[in-house]
Image (cartoon, rainbow, N blue to C red):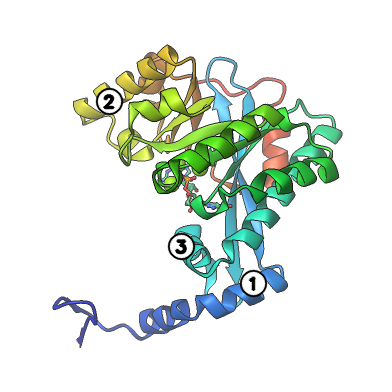
Amino acid sequence: RSKDSGGNQYQYYNPSMNKRNTELLHLETNLYQAIRESQLCLYYQPQININTGKVTGMEALIRWQHPDLGMVSPDQFIPIAEETGFINSIGEWVLFTACEQNKKWQQSGLTPLKIAVNLSPRQCQPNLVTSLKQILKETKLEPEYLELEITETSIIVHPELTQEILEELTEIGISITMDDFGSGYSSVGYLKKFPFQKIKIDQSFVRDLKNEPSDLAIISAVITLGKGFNLQVVAEGVESQEQAYLLKNLQCDTMQGYFFSYPLPVDEATKFIQSVANEGIFLP
Ligand code: C2E
Ligand code: MG
Ligand code: MG
Ligand code: MG
């Protein structure tokens, strides 16, 4: 057993775990290489309108295929990218790639979808507006097909600046979603003050929906709140038919989660969109 450097907790020593931890420490250096050597890619997860069964949007989720570590999850490297400032070049790459892909789907004849892209707090700076205008111009994607997901952290750090930027983006025609709603401060005041079109209920409330009456109450309240503010409400992390049923009964009409589809690499994502384009998905 080795003593954990952080405190007085003991961890069992496992050589492969140790190797991974050491390598994770070097992610910062590796991240530079990742960008240069195109080890980053986007997966796409469909969002389903449960009433029509159709795909209404796709969320772009970044993946890092590390030559030694395999797939490194964004929760592991996005924080490092934020600290080191790499997030700006990564974020720009994500925005460009996602917009370009959405345009390709449109050009292949599919019904136009919205592409949702996650934004880090550090990306919420005035140059974001300039850079997005350029990306939309280059990819020829109409702004109404781009949606940006932000979390409360962006708002808390620089509320005035963030509000200004979000308003400019809304003016261009891009829509803004409040991601992970309920996981942080979730000030209702934000919904009034900031130009959101959509809120995403945090997956922690969906997880135990069946056994936790309080989660049901929270989701129901968020849906009512959303309707009151004229916002669309999306439930994420829907893993079972039972959860989908409960959410449908609460009149949540857009859902995302493993029950419908895992996040998929681009070719599989394309097949998924095509396969449900005509009939849609229906809850049996
Ligand atoms: P998020 O935006 O809240 O994304 C939802 C996360 O839940 C994703 O994890 C997704 O793969 C996962 N998920 C989807 N359906 C289910 C389900 O049914 N059950 C469970 N248990 N999980 C589900 P992922 O892809 O690992 O991303 C984690 C977080 O990393 C994202 O949370 C987002 O905050 C961040 N992220 C991902 N891509 C980007 C990016 O391109 N830029 C930035 N800045 N952040 C990103
Ligand atoms: Mg998201
Ligand atoms: Mg989320
Ligand atoms: Mg999240």
Q: Is residue 252 left or right of residue 94?
A: left
Q: Position of residue 43 (x, y in %)?
A: 62, 50
- The residue at which mark 2 appears reads as 218
- Look at label 2 and name its amino acid: Ile
Residue in the picture at 79% in, 29% down: 110
Q: Where is residue 40 in the image (x, y as percent from the top left)?
A: 65, 63
Q: How far apart are marks 1 and 2 (CA)?
A: 40 Å
Q: Tell me if label 2 and label 3 are in contact, CB under 8 Å.
A: no
- Look at label 3 and name its amino acid: Pro
Instruction: In the rendered view, tell whether residue 202 sits above or below residue 263.
Output: above
Q: Residue furthest left?
A: 8
- Look at label 1 and name its amino acid: Ala
Among the 4 quarters of the image, the one containing residue 104: top right
**In front of the other: 127 or 259:** 127
Residue 79 disc label: 3
**Residue 68 appears anywhere in the view:** no
